[in-house]
Image (cartoon, grey):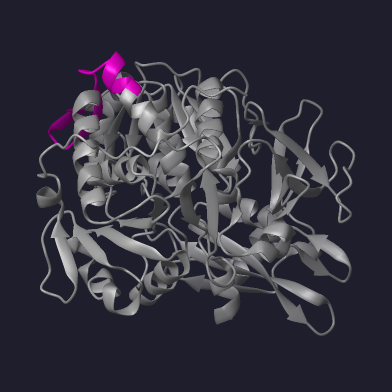
Amino acid sequence: MTYSYQNFYEMISANAKNNPKKTVIFINDEKISNLQLLQRVDSFARFLSHSGMKEDDKIAIVTPNSAEFLIAFFAISKIGAVIVPINNMLKEDEYTYILNDAEVKMLVTSNKFLKETANLQEKTCLEKTVWIDSLPETKGEHFLFSDAMSLPPVNDEVNANKELNDLALLIYTSGTTGHPKGAMLSFKNIFSNVYGGQERFNLNKKDRFIVYLPMFHSFTLSISVLLPIFVGGSMVIIPSVLPFSNIIKQTLLKRVTVFLGIPDVYNALVRAKLPWYFLWFNSVRAFVSGGAALSEDTLTKFNKIFKRAKMLEGYGLSECSPAVAINPMSKQKPLSIGLPLYGYEVKIVDEEMLEVPTGQVGELIVKGDCVMLGYWKRPTATDETIINGWVRTGDLGKVDEEGYIYIVDRKKDLIISKGINIYPREIEEVLYLHDSIKAAAVIGIKDENNGEIPIAYIELDLDKATLTESAVKIYLKQHLANFKIPKNVYFLEELPKTATGKVLKRVLKENH
């Protein structure tokens, strides 16, 4: 593959030169053009350099969705430092672990997260903190973002001119098992992803993305934020996911053409009473779903409501920058994550890493320019995950005759009861079809007689009737073999989830 740019700064510089007045960011009532974005990035990069930040230093971002997030992102890259976007829903101890692990020297954050981020300089190797809104009264070196932007231009602007294979980002995995690990992503990794997205969606400068999912997440960052910039398009940044009616309103008013979501969002959309004028006048041509599996029930209902747009389910993981496969615009298959993106290879293999026949279930492995450089400071974990250039995803899948990929389950979630494989996702799919069930998760627990047994956790739709354990089992028996019926059914007010709506089964297992 040949790439147009070596690094992120080259990309925004080219946009500012070729189309300076084009609005690249819509946020609240503000519009930011390509040229204005570049100027603001230059200003913040000047501050970073002036503050002693150097090439390969790690600088973290913990902010809400904002223009400041993007400005900091590109400025960090311009001076050759490494960007560490971190989940803004974490607690102080979790931030402490990540900042120390990544050896972060500066943090860009917001007063919204004051409780969790204010004292991090005392507990980590942080030297300075930049606040995008207001300064806290706390110990350490603290700066206001607006003040940082006010340094006058100088002749010796720092521009590190990083190259494709250089480390650009450290993305910390959500930590579904143990401590999170930092996936080291290069500029080539990310550019291969955005190139693949452009080709798959047939994007152009007129396309407009809506960004309400958290920008720190690799899925949002690569496909919602960097992809529209890469194609010379625009994005509509929504600072908060609530109220959800605002997302609907901005999608309509700002003429959004590509809408990225997670299953929770699409579950809400098919349940919501959407105004007729939204259904008639919205400009969306592609809805993209990622982050977790989309149920067949949601997909069916969605296609009935939105007749003019395509619903494209995709799949990815942080270790692959993150998108691996998405359904093409020309042909979508229910429950499939589609075809691999341009330039990527996907195989289904057995325990010995040998490819299995078409239609047979095995572990999904991925090869291509998306494959991370490795895990930060974890050579053993890297060697276990990347074998001869192939990433072991830990997901069980199968491929049909046309090359469409289907995810069956997580390898570690597979339940083996009396020697028989039980795939939790199959049971969850049936549970999701029930009108009263909002979310469901099936896990395996150890059993003396059977090896393992399945149990189910259910989050009810509060607007619907309540369910009992026996009613759930009777319902499941109408659709599934007896050996697949969960031994116990537990009801929770809310299932524990990651930022993208993926149920944290580890938490359920720990709390059982």
Would you identify the image quadrant in which residue 208 lies? top left
Horizontal side of residue 431 vs 97, given as left or right: right
Horizontal side of residue 209 vs 469, given as left or right: left
- Where is residue 75 drawn, in percent x and y? 29, 42
Horizontal side of residue 394 vs 135, given as left or right: right
Vertical comparison of 344 with 491: above or below: above
- Where is residue 380 drawn, in percent x and y? 70, 65
Stretch of the chain drawn in magenta: 14-32
In this view, which residue lies farthest toward the bottom?
448
Nearest to the observer: residue 123 or residue 398: 123
Q: Residue at x 85, y 50 (%)?
A: 353
Would you identify the image quadrant in which residue 158 lies? top left
Is 25 a magenta residue?
A: yes
Vertical comparison of 401 with 297: above or below: above
Q: Residue at x 33, y 40 (%)?
A: 74
Badge count: 0
- Where is residue 106 drawn, in percent x and y? 30, 61
The quadrant of the image that shows the C terminus is bottom right
- Where is residue 340 drawn, in percent x and y? 66, 32
User: Can residue 196 be seen?
Assistant: yes
User: Can residue 229 be seen?
Assistant: no
Nearest to the observer: residue 125 or residue 19: 125
Is 221 a magenta residue?
A: no
Nearest to the observer: residue 212 or residue 386: 386
Vertical comparison of 250 with 149: above or below: above
The quadrant of the image that shows the N terminus is top right
Q: Residue at x 48, y 34 (%)?
A: 288
Q: Residue at x 43, y 21 (%)?
A: 285
